[in-house]
Amino acid sequence: MSEAPTRIDFRSNVQHVQPQMPAAVQKATMKFLGTRASVVGILGDDHWQALRQAGHDLRLHAINHLDYYLAQLEEQVTKAGGHVHWARDAEEAKRIVLDIAQSHNVKRAVKVKSMATEEIGLNHALIDAGIQTLETDLGEFIVQLAGVGPSHIIVPAVHLTKEGIADLFREKLGIDAPTDPVQLAAIARAKLRQEFLAADMGLSGANFIVAETGTLAIVTNEGNGRMCTTLPPLHVAVVGIDKVVPDWESLNVLLKLLPRSATGQKLSAYTSFITGTRRTNDENGPTEFHLVLLDNGRTRILQDEVTRETLLCIRCGVCLNVCPVYNNVGGHAYGWAYSGPIGAILSPQLLGVEAAGDLPFASSLCGACAEYCPVKIPIPEILIRLRRRVVEGDRVEDPSASPVLRVAAEVGGRTLGLPWLYEFGSQLLKWVQAPWRSGGWLPNLPPPLDRWTMTRPLPAFGADFREWWRNRTPEGRRRNLERKIGLGVLAGGLIALAAWLLTSGKAQRLTRKRSR
Amino acid sequence: MSLNPAREEILGKVRMALMRRIDAPVPPIPASARVAPRVAGDVNSEIEMLLSEIGKLSGNTRRVAHKQDLKAALQDLVKTEGIKKATVWKTPDLQELGVADVLRSLRVDMVSPHADKYRLAECDLGVTGVDAALPETGTLILRSSPERPRMVSLLPRVHLAIMRLSALRADLHQVFADVKDDGYSIFITGPSRTSDIELTLTIGVHGPKSLHVWVMD
């Protein structure tokens, strides 16, 4: 993925989802949820819920004191022989990395999967400058060959079949590839092994950065993360400022939550802890280390206390797996690096609601994401907040509604707050709907309500639920009768009043008086 | 040091959003953000759990009772994995066990662990010790030092880790106390793996294709 999109049209993207996508995506999400359930089950629900709460409180503490922990981090990384850079936006981050690469005469770079670099489109910037930049995570390597973005945070090539991947290898690598996943992986291993050894620069993100010691924690399964951060003499990490955690004890909580939520593993195959550069020549590792701390909209997310919790995210992808919308459309429909529920809240905040205002509506607000989120991000609440911003304008700094909307909302709220008025209105609907009614349905409503009935009929209003509910008890039946009499008297009174006004001509005089 | 405008702007925006003054104090991390560390069982059940977890992840495990049994075990390994070239950490423990000597006597070509990356990549076998191990997850912790080069457990096709009972730890909490001031440490939980193609589990993507863990008393 290269440039940040200027406008994501979710509806139109959904039209272009390949027909095989939902089945492929669901196969992956079901598998991950299954393994997740078993490893969480081993811990027991009480323990798991305690971990989630700790994860939430810890991340929130870090985010709420971000200035302090970032300064501490910078000091520690520098002390360990690393260089710290600050990037306000994607352009600045790309320029910093490019400057480092060019000043070291880098020709070949190898890269670990990282959402932050995906977000800023780092690969394209480097490739455009003539630096060969290879994704080395197998799934990322495949989607890079295919020239598309990842369709799932954890399994980027989930939408491709082994036949499709074999074709891709034949076409792009000129290798006669069989359609066997194990042999395809072996081909990638052989090809990338040469690249790891020859690379001048290793690029990575980080799952966490520990302020206490200036340590990067990188979680991988294939070993490519270790290759990229051990073999090349130069290591550059691009990390969002939200990734900082106070201390190692924080990792004791977060490393129990992340792999279990992401892939259903107790720990991923490799977790690397890297502090600065290598300390002696004999132990291997890069001689130079640069950390690029990326803002790119994150400080803006901080400004709103409700949406701030978006920054707690540890990018496990479980919210994608449980999301009914994601499961039916896959990752590409979300139009950018981040997909699923986290994409629906992160993209509009990073890109602005003008660009990604569709996404907060790409949700049924069922709340499964919040139930599963290992750091308890209130995703539905944030979705609603962002919907409001889409409607009212994207003003984090001054979150107030237009006067018309405010009055309408006030009137609506007061009406719904009076049960008798609400019930009277719903009784009225029974009569008002008559001209459009056809059996138990309202198949064609007049504008603007036809926006709904264009795609599906609306069930006719029965307005009898409350009555039915009360009818279960003698007391309720008595109240039903009273209400009927009351309504009859009220309706009769209104009709009588109207008749009297019309016949006596008072109505005309009253209207004239008003208009003066 | 001159001021970095990007740094000042980002930190300024953070402080503004959080309404924190420069150098505003930070309260201690709330107790609710901590969890009690796991409590270890007895040594035997811990070792059993460790080896069983590693086994579930397609790692090979073995208990080697005495130093004398090491030779037979290595002989097996060299034969079954077809080892021609190997490299070994230079830690006192592995030197005392004589791993390199035994391998040499089995006519395995030995490469120095301080050789360059191309030569280490040619090795079939890398032998390391284990600085700590976590039974609950089946994890081995390898630290980094001049005697413990990082590539030995990474580049060769087979990784053999020889651990002592004393390496057992109950939880990440205890391990972190050991390694937090290190420049580098790697936590290894089973051999290199992926499910990236049609979710088919494939062992040995970029890292070692097979992992052997031997426990010595």
Image (cartoon, coloured by chain):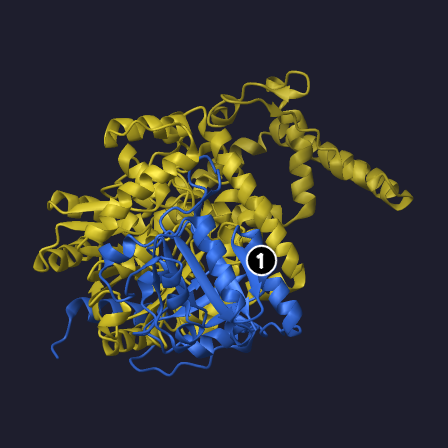
Q: Is residue A97 visible?
A: yes
Q: Quadrant of residue A309?
A: bottom left
Q: Residues within 10 Å of mark 1 (few under 14, many from 20)?
A: many
Colour-to-chain, blue: B
Image coordinates of residue B164 in percent, x first then y, are 52, 73
Determine the residue positioned at 60% across, 67% down. B47
Q: Chain of mark 1?
A: B
Q: Quadrant of the C terminus of chain A?
A: top left
- Judge from the rendering whether residue A280 lies leftward or rightward of residue A437; answer left or right: left
- Judge from the rendering whether residue A59 lies leftward or rightward of residue B166; answer left or right: left
Image coordinates of residue A105 in percent, x first then y, are 8, 56
Residue type at the position of mark 1:
Glu
Determine the residue positioned at 16% across, 59% down. A96
Determine the residue positioned at 47% across, 55% down. B77
Give the secondary structure at mark 1: helix
Residue at the far top: name it.
Answer: A438
Image coordinates of residue B22 in percent, x first then y, are 29, 80
Q: Is residue B189 visible?
A: no
- Judge from the rendering whether residue A477 lies leftward or rightward of residue A283; answer left or right: right
Out of A142 and A187, give the one closest to the viewer. Answer: A187
Out of A105 and A386, give the one closest to the viewer. Answer: A105
Image coordinates of residue A64 in percent, x first then y, are 41, 70
Determine which residue is flagged by label 1.
B53
Display colour for chain A: yellow
- Judge from the rendering whether residue A131 lies leftward or rightward of residue A349; answer left or right: left
Residue at the far right: name it.
Answer: A474
